[in-house]
Every structure is written in C-alpha cells, then in structure tokens.
Amino acid sequence: MINGISIDLYLWLSSILFVIGVIGVMLRRNTIILFMCIELMLNAVSLLMVAFSALHQDTAGQVFVFFNMAVAACEVAVGLAILTMIFRRSKSIDADLLSNLKN
Amino acid sequence: MIGLIIIIGLGILAMISEIFNFKKLLHPIVLVGVIAAGTFNLIEWNQPVKIQYFDNMLAFDRPALAFSTVILFVALLWFTLSRTYFKNGGHLVDQYTLVLFMMVGAIILTAFTNMTTLFLGIEIMSIPLYVLAASKKGDPASNEAGFKYLLMGAFASSFLLFGIALVYGATASFDLATIQNFIATNQANLPNFFYVGVVFILVAMLFKISVAPFHFWAPDVYEGSPTVITALMSTIVKIAGIAAFLDLFIGSFQDVSFLWIKIISVIAAISLVVANVTAGVQTSVKRMLAFSSVSHATFMLLAILANLAYNVSVETLLYYSLSYAMASLIAFGILDLVKQDEGYSFKSFNGLYVRNPFLAISMTIAMLSLAGIPLASGFFAKYFVLSSLFDSGYIYLNVLAIIAAVIGACFYFKVIIAMYNGDSENRKKIQVETAQGVVFVICTGVIIVLGAFPGLIVELF
C-alpha cells in the first residue's frame, strides 16, 4: 500500500501503458509515432519502478529511473539522427519504405 | 577491472585524437592499448585481490576475466582486419571511438553483478552499434539496417526493463546475489508477477542474442550493415550476450529453472529448425552467415539448457564462442574482400582457389569449423554441447540438434564447392594486405590448435 492505494493498481496501470506501447510499435507505421510508443513503454517501466521503490522504502528503484531516462534520451537522439538521414534520401518517414532488405 | 579502465581511456583518447591531431597514431595506440588490457586481465587472473567494484556492481571473477579476454582478443584481430576499410572510408576517429565504447559495454556484460550494470552494459554496447550499423551514410541498406536495429533494440530493452522492474518489485533488490538468496528462501510465496518478470528478461535476452523466433531483425541488420561491422556484431556482441545470459540464468535464476528451462527448450527446437532451413535457401552469403549465427547462438543456448555446474558451462561456452568467433572473423573478412558488384551472392566465391589460394584455404577451414567437421575446433564445440545435453536427458532435442547440424553443413559446403569448382569469368587476383593475412593465419591457427587440443580451454578452471 502506498498512501492507501494498493500496489496492484500501479502494476495494472503501468502494464496497460506498456501494452499500449507494444501494440503501437506493432501497428503504427509512422516512425515518429514508433519512437513515441517506445518512450511510452520505457516510461511505463519508470512509473512501475518508482511505485515499487516507494513500496519497499528503497531508493535504488528511483536511482534506476535516472539511468532509464538517460538511456531513453540517448536512444531517441541516435534514432532521430538516423531518421533524418533516411528522410533526406526518401523524403518520407513511413516505416514501410524501410523494407528493401527482405527477400 | 584495469582492462576495462584502459579501454574506457582508449575511447576518450580516440575522441580527442582529432583535436590534438594524432589521428595517424590512433591505430597503433589502440592495438597497444587492447594488448595491455588483455595482459592486465591475465595478471588479475592469478591475483587474489578484491574483485568487486562500485559497491558490488561489477565483479571480475575468473569467468568474467576469461570472457573479457576473449572479447579483447577478438577485438584486437578485428581492429587489424578492418584497418583497410577505415583507411578508405574515412571517419576513422568516430568509428574507433564507437567501437571502443561498444567494447566497454561488452566487458561490463561479462562482469555485472547487479541489474543496473546489466542494463547499462547492454545499452552501452547497443547504442554505438546502432550508429555503426548506419555508418555508411550514402547507402540506403545501411540506413535501414541501423534504423531496424535501433527500433528492435529499444523494443527489446524496454522488455528487459519491465522484467527488471517486476523482479525488483518482488525481491526489493537489484543485486543479483540478494535476488538469488531471496528466491532460495522464499521459493513458495513468490508473487506471480515475479515469474512474468523472469520471462520478460528471458525474452529480451533472446532478442539480444538473436535466437529464433526473436531473430527476425538479425538477417536484415547483418545484411545491411557494412561487412566489418557485421563481423563485430556476430562475434563480440554474441559473446557478451551469451556471457550475460549465463550469469543471469545459471547464476541468479537457477532456483526457478523449472520456469525457463521449458521455454528455452521449445525455443531452441524452433530456432534449430528455422535457422538451418532458412539458411539453406539463401542466395546471399552474408544473409546465410546471419542465419548461421542464429544457429550458433542456439547451440550456445543448448549449453545453458544442459544446466551444468557453472564452471563447466563457462568452459563449454568459452570454447564455443572462441571457435565460432575465429571462424566468423575469417568468413566476414574474406567476404568483404571477394564481394563484387552483384552483391554477396555465392557466385562471388567462384574460382577463389585460382584467384587466391591462401584466401580459399583459410575460408575452407573457417567453413569446416562452422559446419562442425572433426579436427576443426567447431567439431569439439558442438560435441561438448551435445554430449552435455545428452547427459542431462534431452534426447529429442539432441537428435534434432544433430539433424540441424547436418543440414547446416550442406550450406557451408556450398561455399567450399563454389571456391574450388566454380569457374569464374573474373580471373583477377585478389590483393591481401599483410596485416589481414596475419589475422587470417592467426584465426586458422587458433581453430586448428583448439581443434587438436581442446583441453587448452576445457580444463581452464
């Protein structure tokens, strides 16, 4: 229990956010939206870690969230750089254009 | 630990070499640095000193030192092999920096004792690789490979994180030893979400070492990336990934093995069939090697499944990964030399024996080793895995693995046949630089010596 709210609710909330992210990555074809969905997944995890951290009265979980944010920022920075490179060539950010390597 | 610090220092040095204008010296400095790091690993091997660092987040025990020395050895050969590529391609400083930091991540993965360092190691290893995969800016295939790798890597990382969060929620700790104790003492009343967390971590790790059905990104990424980077992905990343897998599952999640053993055995069966059958129908050698790396990752997974004592698993995997890495370096190195305008088809190997007998013989030994023919080290690598699997009673899986290995041998022989029989219109001799020749000689030497004396590694611990 954290302030009278059961940990199960936090678990459900972050699981639902995570699943929305997963479905988004699988269904959407706009690459910017794909990045947003991955961010959603990572932030769902951050929420869960902070909730467990409060539950266990242990700061390690919150420290982990900082690493989590830093890594998410790195991934998006690299991703957007690659995306800019692709956009210059094909003038589009549709993920379906990126399927030339399949036989 | 000193080895890790040296590699970090080399990475920083590589970054400032552009500013202080000693770019030309970078290559020898990196080679010396990697050798020094390897030497310090060997010194630490015999030293009974404190092995835990950073508040018990990294521990360089003997298995970690052994795996990181293998990684450093492969990296040393890789730097020598890829020298020509960087000479012609430019951007040497950027790419050396990225490769060095990737190695930092890989070494952390061999030595982590905390979920935090596991996550950071995987990310430090992966993020430079996303950039390296996309590093051929003008080539749409390379861009696509980089983007796919990034998307799938980030997707897998968030699964890993979710798993870590759930395990943390159940055990209230990120420390692997604490988690292991907690599981051992509270086996009966672990919450359900703990098991979900372990499965999520398992799936994410399978993604990272690319075992079917989580391998769908691997062929595209391997094919699109520059060949030297593919060589890096199929050697160092695989070794680091499998070392991390071993530490996690034989180490901390040993007591819930009833959960992951079933999953891994089903996945290994699927992966053996899928990887070897699809590899057989490929027309591009690079794609075939990508599927072959999936198949070899599965064999390494089988060694974990055999559920041996930790030391025996380490020896088996060390032997397997070293022998696979050597053969893989030769295969990708020669592929880069012989590829022609039409791409990476089997045709480009036609008549290689006439064009350059030395390359043809090296490639033959590499292919025989990958196929698992006796006297090459690949045979004993597969033999140790399969015999330990047999001892633990996985008869059906064993039969399947042997059939898969036989099917696998066929497509490696396709390359060999093309080299000796295929007539090539192109009679041009292939020039091999001395440094590259030395790398091929060392790799074939290691393959043959390991094949003749497997005890060198198997009795290490």
Image (cartoon, coloured by chain):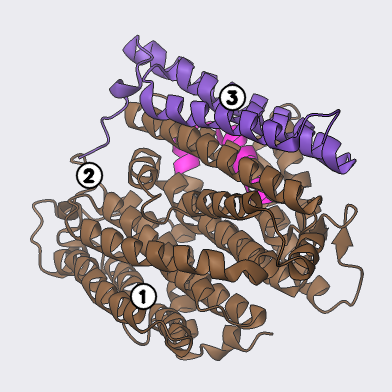
Chain colours: A purple, B brown
State if disc 1 and disc 3 touch (CB < 8 Å): no
Amino acid under disc 2: Gln
- Residue A78 vs B445, above or below: the answer is above
Q: Residues within 10 Å of mark 3 (few under 14, many from 20)?
A: many
What is the chain identity of the residue bearing mark 2? B
Let me know if residue B435 appears in the view. yes
Residues rendered magenta in the picture? B85-105
Give the x, y percent position of residue B213.
36, 52
What is the chain identity of the residue bearing mark 1? B
Label 2: state its secondary structure: loop
Q: Which mark is residue B104?
A: none
Residue at image position (58%, 70%) is B257
Label 3: state its secondary structure: helix
Q: Which mark is residue B340?
A: 2
Q: Which label lies toward us, 3 or 2?
A: 3
What is the spatial separation of the Cα atoms under label 1 and label 2, in whole angstroms?
Answer: 25 Å
Does B96 lie within the magenta span? yes
In the image: residue B359, left or right of residue A56: left
In the image: residue B199, left or right of residue B381: right
Residue denoted by label 1: B369
Name the foreground residue: B365 vs B70.
B70
Give the x, y percent position of residue B65.
72, 68
Label 1: state its secondary structure: helix
Check the image and name the residue furthest to the front. A4
Residues marked 1 and 2, same chain = yes
State if disc 2 and disc 1 touch (CB < 8 Å): no
- The first of marks 1 and 2 along the sequence is 2
Does B224 lie within the magenta span? no
Q: Residues within 10 Å of mark 1 (few under 14, many from 20)?
A: many
Amino acid under disc 1: Ser
Residue denoted by label 3: A39
Residue at image position (30%, 59%) is B275
